Amino acid sequence: MTTEATSSPAPKTPAPGSMSAQEKKNAREDRGGVRGWYGRQPKIVRIVLGVVFAALAFLLPYVGEIPLLGPQIVTQGIDWPSALFNMSYYVLLALGLNVVVGFAGLLDLGYVGFFAVGAYTVALLSSPDSVLRTEWGWLAAVPIGLAVAMLSGLVLGYPTLRLRGDYLAIVTLGFAEIIRIVATSTETLRGDRGFSDIPHPPGEFSDGKPIFGVADAIPYYWLGLAVIILVIFAVRNLDNSRVGRSWLAIREDQEAAEIMGVRTIKYKLWAFAIGAFIGGLGGVMFAGQQGFMNSQTFILQFSILVLAGVVMGGSGNIAGAILGGALISYIPDRLRGIEDPIWHTDLFGFRFAIFGAVIIAIMIFRPQGLIPSRRRAMELKDREKEVAPIE
Amino acid sequence: MNFSGLIQDFGPLTITGLAQGAIIALFALGYTLVYGVLRLINFAHSEVFLIGSYACLVVWGFFGLDQNSATPNVMSVIGLLLLGLVVAIVFSGLTALGVELVAYRPLRKRNAPPLAFLITAIGASLFISETVGVMTQRNIKGVPPLIQPRDVFVIGNMHVTNLQILIIVLALVSMFLLDRFINRSRLGRGIRAVAQNPDSAALMGVNKSRVISLVFLLGGLMAGIAAVMYDLKIGVTRFDAGFLLGIEAFTAAVLGGIGNLRGALLGGLLLGLLQNYAASLFGTEWLHAASFVLLVLILLVRPTGLLGESLGRARA
């Protein structure tokens, strides 16, 4: 487990909407375990702890220097800073998908589509292979990439959000496949040949060398981490706002929410757009680091992997999403370069199979996830107590 | 947009579309049956099909057949086909039962929310297809040429081959038998009862758990037949063969009215035709995109499908 994964800035309070500040405080302090202890500390201690966690996360690239323990943690088949960067964009994707699946309760199986839209927009605008051939740098393309990703979330969401949950899942899955097919078959998007020489993020050291080079992935990881911290704050505040309360209401009972005056379509669209935005953010960072991408990058299993991360970590909980996102990237990368005893292939190839089994096990034995959202755990318990179906 | 091509090749496109559609329809039955009874999408059904498509190849492999071997004589072809069908049906059925046991039953006991079922089913699907992927090194596997496609009759430029006839006839026969089973047999009556109202059915003495297992099993059997037909038609299979075809089969089920057996047949045949026409109009790479677009359109315009939704109410 990584340090950044446990660095929840502050625990999420249950049902933020229905509580006064005092009640919130009580709820925060009532919990057992680490999170309860954390909640009981004075605000200044909590801030200091948060900063310490963040600082530790920033120091992760050097964890290999620790004697004995360090070499066990770092990956072998892929250099450790790159693995950390991979983790950072998986965590971003998990945070974004958590908004859609965990907060609003909309099962989106095509989340990789937004990641692809973000990455492709950047590639189209800045790669020399693109038909547009602008001389733009990475940073200039980023806002447009994010806007297009968000827009694609609205475009997909508007017609489909009226659908029932399981239909929505299939349609979003279709959306991701269509994006992949379009990317494979249209000339402008270059299919398998892909885009190369996508510019890296700007910035130079004092000696004129670029900060974001090809060899060293540490600056990218730090960039990713900084973005993650910003996203955490944004998402946490959203969850504690009117929007977050509406999501909660929609997730628990859509009809009831509608009757109470929650504009369900509007807030579902919000969830989709914000999720798409964060997914696009992951995409533009990915494009900026890799410098190359093609239509094979955006396979469907990727969406399902991120979903596995969210469910595994604890759907509806930010700390859970971070842990889940980090694990789905770390475990396969750690397995890379290790041979399995039976087929003598790289264990990396088993990653999807392993996570498939993990999803089932989690949903059966611990449906609330590794770090449960208290509210979600209560919902699940509630259902169990309802009239049991006759067998 | 290639309209003249479409008009010129209308006949051939129609017959390939029908053969493709027959396979899709058989596959779609699994979605429709499970949905009719549980109101859940069995996402792992594509892997039920996948196991069938590999099982028959393994058996034919025992007889030393691979994609390079010559076509055996007629009697052994019939024997091998029957054997392949039986094995594929058995393994697909067992896979379906296994999926139900592992991914559905534990959640049902706990009255989990519907999306939880979808997530476990996705997990099961990923697990099965990726395990097959690792075991086969993600390579494609060729199918022995048991049936050499030969023209049986020709109308205009429409060449109808023996394989196409076999596929369509076999699909229609198995659907007819399934339809009779659901409508006439005692077990079928149980299925319809649970589809109409699970709690009342349970109070009337229907064993709900057994009906649910039966429904998964029936879907698996049909997927097994579809898998053998697919192998013979396409000539190769792969660890992810079930996935795209699964989405298409699901589209077909929704198109005809999910939960409705005859709807699955209609939807499958229609989808097969539409796909082939669309591929001719826009180019073959858009074949799969066409079914996705169609799915979204149906769900927006007429989510109950052409023939309506219910397994219980409509006479099958």
Image (cartoon, coloured by chain):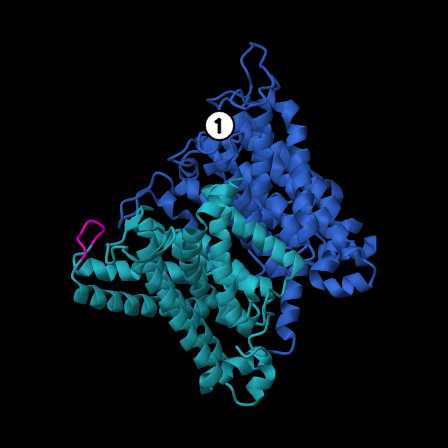
Chain colours: A blue, B cyan
Closest to the observer: A92 or B222? B222
Q: Position of residue A130 (x, y in %)?
A: 54, 24
Q: Position of residue A116 (x, y in %)?
A: 56, 37
Q: As drawn, which residue projects farthest toward the top?
A: A207
Q: Which residues are magenta?
A: B66-71
Q: Position of residue B9 (x, y in %)?
A: 44, 47
Q: As drawn, which residue projects farthest toward the front?
A: B156
Closest to the observer: A307 or A276? A276
Q: Please name the residue shown 56% across and 32% down the image.
A: A120
Main SS of residues in magenta? loop
User: For residue A261, what is the image quadrant?
Assistant: bottom right
Left or right position of A186 against A387: left
Q: Is residue A289 visible?
A: yes
Closest to the observer: B98 or B44? B44
Decide: is B152 above or below A211: below
Q: Position of residue B259 (x, y in %)?
A: 55, 70
Left or right position of A144 against A264: left
The chain carrying label 1 is: A
Circle count: 1
Q: Please name the residue shown 72% across and 49% down the image.
A: A269
Left or right position of B248 against A35: left
Decide: is A288 above or below B204: above
Q: As drawn, which residue projects farthest toward the bottom?
A: B204
Q: Amino acid at mark 1?
A: Phe
Q: Please name the residue shown 42% across and 62% down the image.
A: B22
Q: Was residue B68 drawn as part of the magenta stretch in this picture? A: yes
Q: Please name the residue shown 27% across and 48% down the image.
A: A343
Closest to the observer: B286 or A230? B286
The residue indicated by pointer 1 is A292
For the N terminus of chain B, the quadrant is top right
